[in-house]
Image: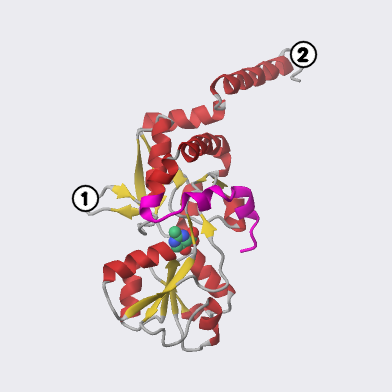
Amino acid sequence: MIKITNTHGKRGTAALAACAIFAVTLATGTSVLAQESLERLREQGFARIAIANEPPFTAVKPDGSVSGAAPDVARAIFKKLGVDDVVASVSEYGAMIPGLQAKRFDVVTAGLFMKPERCRAVAYSEPILCDAEAMAVKKGNPLKLQSYADIAKNPNAKIGAPGGGTEERLALEAGVPRDRVIVVPDGQSGIKMLQDGRIDAYSLPVLSINDLIQKANDSNLEVVAPVQNTPVYCDGAAFRKDETELRDAFDKVLAELKKSGEFAKIIEPYGFSAKAAMETSREKLCMASN
Ligand code: 6CS
C-alpha cells in the first residue's frame, strides 16, 4: 500500500513517483528502469556483446559477422525488445566480467557458465546453453587422462585451458600446479600446442572441443568426454548488477522463445539441448557447488 502524505510535499512527491513507476510497470510489463536501459540501447541501435569466438557457443565469421548460439539467441531477444542488432567484442573469459562492469559491453553472451562466484558479480539471465567438459588428447590417450585429478597426479602432464575459464579453475582446484596449467588464447592455438606436444590435454566444453577436432582433421588426436567428476554447466546472458530490470526484460522474452519453440530452433542446430536449459534454473546453477 503506497501511502501518500502532504507533509511538505516531499514524501508525497516520492510516493507519487513510486506510483508512476508502478503504473508504467503494470501497463507495459517492463519497469521504468528497464525502459531507460532499453531506450539507451535502442538509441545506440545495438547491444554491445562480449564473446570469445569459440564455436559453436560464439563465432566471428571471416566476413566479420557474428554467429554462434549465444549471439543468435541474444540477437533474437534484443530484436523483440526493439534493439536492432548486436555488436561483438572478442574477449578472454577472465576479462568478460571486468569489461562488463567497466561498461565496455552491455551484456556478456559467450557461454560464460553460471557459478556462484560469477553469480555474485553479475545479473545472469535464465539458462541458455548447457554443456559438459571435455579434453582433447593425443590418440590413444597415452597418459590415460580422464579427469583433472589425473593431470594433477602426473608430474609430467600439462593442460591447456582458456584464461579465467572454468577448465583452468577446475584444473587448479583439482591440484594441478599453476606451472602445469597453460593459458591458451584460442582454440586453434590449443590444438597446435597439443599437436606440438607442448601440452598433453586441451580442455574446453564438449561441443567446442568437438568443433575444433573436426576442423583439425588430425587422426593423431582424440577426445575424452565428459571429463570425469565434472558437472554439466549452463551459461546465461550476463548483465551488470545494476541492470537487473534489463535482465528481467531479457528473461521475459527468453521465456516466450522457450515456450514457443523458437529457442530450440535457434540453439539445437548448433548441437545444444533446449531441454537441458529448460530443466534447470539460474537459482539452481548459482547455488551449485562448483
Ligand atoms: O564459462 C567458462 O568459463 C567456459 N565457457 C565456455 C563456453 N568455454 C570455455 C570457458 O572456460
The reply to whether the residue tagged 1 has its Cβ within 8 angstroms of ligand 1 is no
SS class, disc 2:
loop
SS class, disc 1:
loop
Label 2 crowd bin: few (<14), some (14–19), many (20+), radius 10 Å: some
From the viewer's perspective, is residue 253 above or below residue 128?
A: above
Q: Earlier in the sequence, mark 2 or mark 1?
A: 2
17 vs 107, left or right, is right
**Residue at screen point 63% across, 49% down:** 283
Q: Amino acid at mark 2?
A: Thr
> Mostly what secondary structure, the magenta segment?
helix
**Residue at screen point 35% across, 58% down:** 55
**Residue at screen point 37% across, 77% down:** 222
Residue named by callout 1: 63
Q: Nearer the viewer, mark 2 or mark 1?
A: 1
Residue 147 position in % (x across, y down): 52, 77
Total numbered badges shown on the rendered structure = 2
Which disc is residue 5 wearing?
A: 2
For the rendered model, the colour scheme is: secondary structure
